[in-house]
Image (cartoon, rainbow, N blue to C red):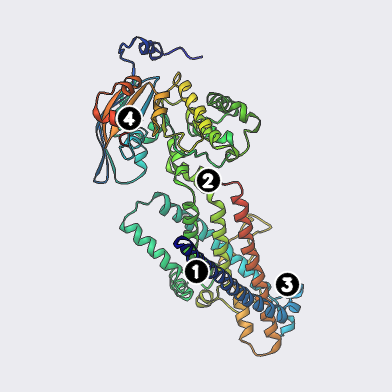
Amino acid sequence: MLASQNLRKQEARASRRRSIDRWFGRIGFLVTLGTLGVLAILLLNLAANGLTRIDWQFLLSFPSRRAAEAGILSAWVGTILLMMVTASVAVPLGVAAGIYLEEYAPKNKWTDFVEINISNLAGVPSILYGLMALGLFVYQFRFGQSILAGGLALACLVLPIVIVATREALRTIPASIREGAFALGATRWQAVWHHLLPYSTGGIATGVILAMSRAIGESAPLITIGALTFIAFLPPAPILAHAPFISFDWLFSPFTALPIQMFNWVSRPGEEFQSNAAAAGLFLMLITLSMNGAAILLRRHAQRNIKW
Amino acid sequence: MNPIPAAQVSRVKDITEVEVKPEVKVEIQSLSFFYGRNQVLRNVSLDVPAYQVTAMIGPSGCGKTTLLRCLNRMHDLYPGNRYEGSVRLHPGGTDILGPGMDPIRVRMRFGMVFQKPNPFPKSIYENVAYGLRLQGMNKRRDLDERVEKALRESALWDEVKSRLHQLAHNLSGGQQQRLCIARAIATDPDVVLFDEPTSALDPIATSKIEELIVEMKKRVTVIIVTHNLQQAGRISDRTAFMYLGELIEFGETNRLFTNPAKPQTEDYISGRFG
């Protein structure tokens, strides 16, 4: 008698717990849907305004006073060159710092302090990086308002992201793998180079791509260091037809970038420039989304062969 | 293949019950180990005989794994650890804890097999070849030969010879552990350390590993930490019983199990604690 009563009470409690569980699932689903909906509306709105503007003429023309003749050639070339500088500075520095902090650094107050401040750096507003770059790279190092200064500013901005991604990728490798390598007589460097880096490439590359897609959309630091908004020429080519065949003059060229071009058009009166801005925004969005997509594919591909 | 070592011949003593002093491989002399301020090993002295299997038993936390990991200086990987005393590797008698001794050189002479199989996420071949590559062997032909030898000696060759270049993780748990044994012996170490190598395996895989260990002692000295008293009884020639960081008793396995000298040993092997 008593036992069956108890059973019924437990049954009632269980069904209540189940319904809480179900409701949480439903609410979560709705919230997710809402977030995706906002993104979809944003994309559709950009597409509605700008899709018709995207054609070869738009991609291959310099900005112009006449909206119909304007294009984003100097902007996307500038963006690509900026990203080359950013990646070639942020990736080696960030990965090396991540490896050092995770595999070499002793655990003490000093490294705790460094660790906390890397997280802090990730939260610093991007315009402050712009101000630092203006003072340090533009004036102190006399790089001018150049691609080099802009790329370095963005590299500083995304460096913490690369460091954190590297550390997290390394942390997923179990200690037993490290010990297995050390037990055979590997040095720390050999363990990193032969095992830890290859096994975490997927995670690191994913972090790097996400960092780059963050950098590609940044405008504040570039505006701060004085990126121009109206550029009707391309930087000098990096490859020459004559010796020494490679030139770094482009590093010191003034530049513009996609978000800046977009910002410039948005701030102009006139309907046609608005649709130019939407088209540039759409193009930027496509680049970012495909970079993120690549990150996901890369992660899947890299983890295919790695199980612990 | 190899000449029969002296210690093998002296195993006749098991029958005649005459204690013959076997050749000593690892001479542990008043070894203490500290983890920070915490002393984990207390003044342990122990002569590990060459070409025999020495088992270390004792309840959890008694320091047997800590002792094992002193022998290949694994503790050096983590901060705050300190050794006292000496561990001499014979012949030669170099103190592997001595100042100026490079832990990496120590680890190349002591192979280690861990509790859970830990193959690298690489091919079967590359797993076995890794230690050889670290020691500078590059020629494909030499590597092929040594990889095959190691896989044969770990009774894995016939199972994997057709798929040497497939991922090691496609093997079963028992096969993975035998692969780890192959990886450890490929470089011809003097001693192979086993840290509870069968605790993650089923009985059939376990018995294969046990057979392998018994077979292996023709070529190397084996030290095995085990939680499983039956296992120690089945495969070891000598057993060390440890308790609370001290070596309580060390002797021939048969004698220690049938006629322990110390009351703690008797309590432990009869299942009264541990």
Crowd band around label 4 with a 10 angstrom C-alpha radius: few (<14), some (14–19), many (20+): few
Q: Which mark is residue A60?
A: 3
Residue A51 sits above or below residue A171 on the image: below
Marks 2 and 3: in contact by CB < 8 Å? no
Residue at the (39%, 35%) spot, across then down: B104
* Element marked by disc 2: loop
Quadrant of res B53: top left
Q: CA distance from mark 3 to mark 2?
A: 49 Å
Marks 4 and 1: in contact by CB < 8 Å? no
* Element marked by disc 1: helix
Q: Nearer the viewer, mark 4 or mark 3?
A: 4
Q: Position of residue A248 (x, y in %)?
A: 58, 61
Q: Amino acid at mark 3?
A: Leu
Q: Amino acid at mark 2?
A: Trp
Residue that mark 1 sits on? A153
* Element marked by disc 4: loop
Q: CA distance from mark 1 to mark 3?
A: 27 Å
Q: Nearer the viewer, mark 2 or mark 4?
A: 4
Q: Which mark is residue B270?
A: 4
